[in-house]
Every structure is written in C-alpha cells, then in structure tokens.
Image (tube, rainbow, N blue to C red):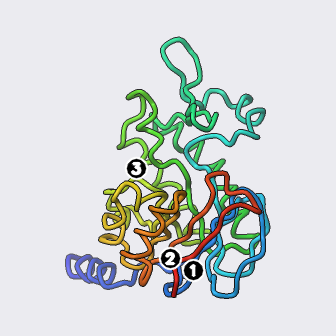
Amino acid sequence: MRRLVLALVALLLLAPAPSYGLQELPVGTGVDYQLGGNRGVPAHVGIVVRDRTARPAGRYDVCYVNGFQTQPGEKRFWQRRRHLLLQDGRGRLVEDEAWGEWLLDLRTPAERRALARIVGRWTAGCARDGYEAVEFDNLDSFTRSSGLIRRRHAVAYARLLIRAAHRAGLAVGQKNLAGLRGTRLGFDFAVAEECGRYDECSRYTAVYGRRVLMIEYRRPDFERTCAAYGAAAAVVLRDRDLSPDGVRAYCPR
C-alpha cells in the first residue's frame, strides 16, 4: 500500500499543469484601447481591448470587465444586490468618486464567491463572444476603500476571477497595481495605465517581460515610454475618455 501511495504521489508531481487552451498575448505588435467606443483598427495593431458589451475587433481581443467596482450604467443591477457592495459604518455605499463607481465588498469568503459567480458569468460571455483574453479592472480598489478592504481580500478574490477565466479559455491580464507578482496568482500578462508617467513600467516588465500593454494619456509620458519600452512592449497614447474619435498614437517603428 505504501508503495502504491508513493507511486500515485509521483505521478501527480510529474503530471503537467492543466491546459485551458489559452492563447497567449502576442508580442511584437501594437495595442489599441477602445473602452469608450469602437473604431477602425490599423493593420499594424494586433491587440485590441474593448468593453465586454462590445463586439471583438477580430485581432487578439481583450475583454474589459470591471471586476472590482460597478460600472456607472449598471447601478440598478447593483442596487438589487446592495449586500454585495461595500458600506461604511453609517451604511453608506463607498464610492470611487473619480468615476462614480461603487466598490464591491470583498471582505468575506462568501461575498467573494457570490461576486465571482456574477463576474464569472460576464467572463464566460466574453469567451462566447470570441475574445481571447480578459482584463479585470480596479484590482487596486482596496486602496480607495478607507482601509475597509485589505490587499489580501483583493488577492483572494482575484484568484477566483482568474480561475473562472482560465476555465472559460481566456488569458487574464493584471490591470495596474505595480509591484504585485501577478504571475503567482495566475495572471498571464499586464495592462498598465500611465506606468510611464509614474515610473512604474519596469515593475511590470520585471514580472511579465514583453507581455505588458502600456496606455498613456499625456503625450510627454507617451514619448518617454516609447523611448524606453516601445521596441519591446505595446504602447498606445489615448485620450482619457477613450472616445472613438479621440487621441490615438503609436510608437514609431
């Protein structure tokens, strides 16, 4: 019996990691960030990020899902699920005031599981629609919770979202939160907003190598990021509203 147990353990240790048929983020191509509305995609751009309610562009398509906060247009949906929203000591909903979004309450395992089921359904929808990957926005929302949500809560919840996305066949991008060793959680690439502005790009490339999407919103930051990382990473300049006819520029090749 002992030999049998040891043999089974050895087989488990030698077995390959489960394959979910993921398509890795391509390198050596450009990225377009189109959350504010769809537009044509230049031929040299092989990666496009769009909102989960939009159709994929037909390139390597990354589906945007607001996984840690509410979308402004979905308040009625979340008001019916108020128990899953973060509330302060007076019962008031905690809001990311910059965007008018409520924070999801990640503090207990039961709440995290309930939220992961909701977001997991959206993620499965991305896969059905033809996306190859997903990015879950506002991983760093705990920093805007006045200390109510801890980093460990966000990390535990992120693991659930990553697991659901991989089961759906999608690669998963870590959105912001420089310094997190996201590959240890299962993230496959990173989406870094304004890493050039805040001198954080190297903290992403140290973890993900060339598989980092860099979005800048100010031209001087964009030019510096292109000079430092444009030969390897995908960098794009966009207007902050990400409007369909707004600013869009790529690093010179």
Q: Which label number is shown at residue 30?
A: 1
For disc 2, the neighbor class at 10 Å (few under 14, some 14 to 19, many from 20) is many
Q: Quadrant of residue 121?
A: bottom right
Mark 1 in CB contact with mark 2 (< 8 angstroms): yes
The disc labelled 3 sits on which kind of residue? Val
> Which secondary structure lies at badge 2?
strand
> Which secondary structure lies at badge 3?
helix
Q: Which label number is shown at residue 240?
A: none
Q: Which label number is shown at residue 155?
A: 3
Q: Residue furthest front?
A: 220
For disc 1, the neighbor class at 10 Å (few under 14, some 14 to 19, many from 20) is many
Determine the residue positioned at 75% across, 72% down.
56
Mark 1 or mark 3: which comes first in sequence?
Answer: 1
Determine the residue positioned at 51% across, 72% down.
235
Mark 2 or mark 3: which comes first in sequence?
Answer: 3
Determine the residue positioned at 70% across, 82% down.
42
The disc labelled 2 sits on which kind of residue? Ala
The disc labelled 1 sits on which kind of residue? Gly
Vertical placement of 181 versus 150: above or below? below
Determine the residue positioned at 42% across, 84% down.
231
Labels 1, 3: front one: 1
Q: Which label number is shown at residue 234?
A: 2
Q: Position of residue 165 (x, y in %)?
A: 57, 64
**Spatial CA span between label 1 and label 2:** 5 Å
Q: Is residue 196 left or right of residue 247?
A: left
